[in-house]
Image: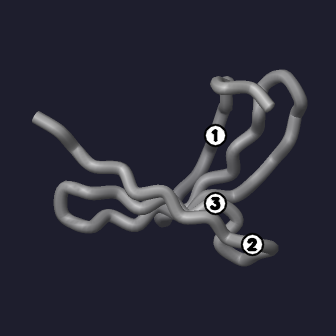
Amino acid sequence: MSASARYSFTGENGYADFVEMSSGERFRVQFIAQGRQLMLVANPEGPGPTRYMCQLLG
């Protein structure tokens, strides 16, 4: 597994479809804005949704 990757994505209405540039792997992400935070939910419909919390600094 690589420590970094490059993705392209397109989306609307709080959802985006990501494509990993070297492997072509695809997955869906849901974006949920919560004040100064952004919750990213990878594979929101399953299997195994994974949540990432991002916070605006500065």
In this rendering, which labeled residue sits more in front, label 3 or label 1? 3
The answer to whether 32 is drawn above or below residue 7 in the figure is below
In percent of width and height, residue 3 lies at 66, 26
Nearer to me, 55 or 25: 55
Q: How is the image coloured?
A: one colour
What is the distance, in whole Å, between disc 3 and disc 1 at their CAs?
A: 13 Å
Between disc 1 and disc 2, whose residue precedes?
1
Residue 9: image tag: 1
Residue pointed to by mark 2: 48
In this rendering, which labeled residue sits more in front, label 1 or label 2? 2
Badge 2 amino acid: Gly
Badge 1 marks a residue whose secondary structure is strand
At x 26%, y 67%, the residue is 34
Badge 3 amino acid: Ala
At x 41%, y 62%, the residue is 39
Nearer to me, 21 or 3: 3
In this rendering, which labeled residue sits more in front, label 2 or label 3? 2
What is the distance, in whole Å, between disc 2 and disc 3 at their CAs?
A: 9 Å
- Occupied quadrant, residue 2: top right
Q: Residues within 10 Å of mark 1 (few under 14, many from 20)?
A: some
- Occupied quadrant, residue 38: bottom left
Badge 1 amino acid: Phe
Q: Residues within 10 Å of mark 2 (few under 14, many from 20)?
A: few
Residue 44: image tag: none
Residue 42: image tag: 3
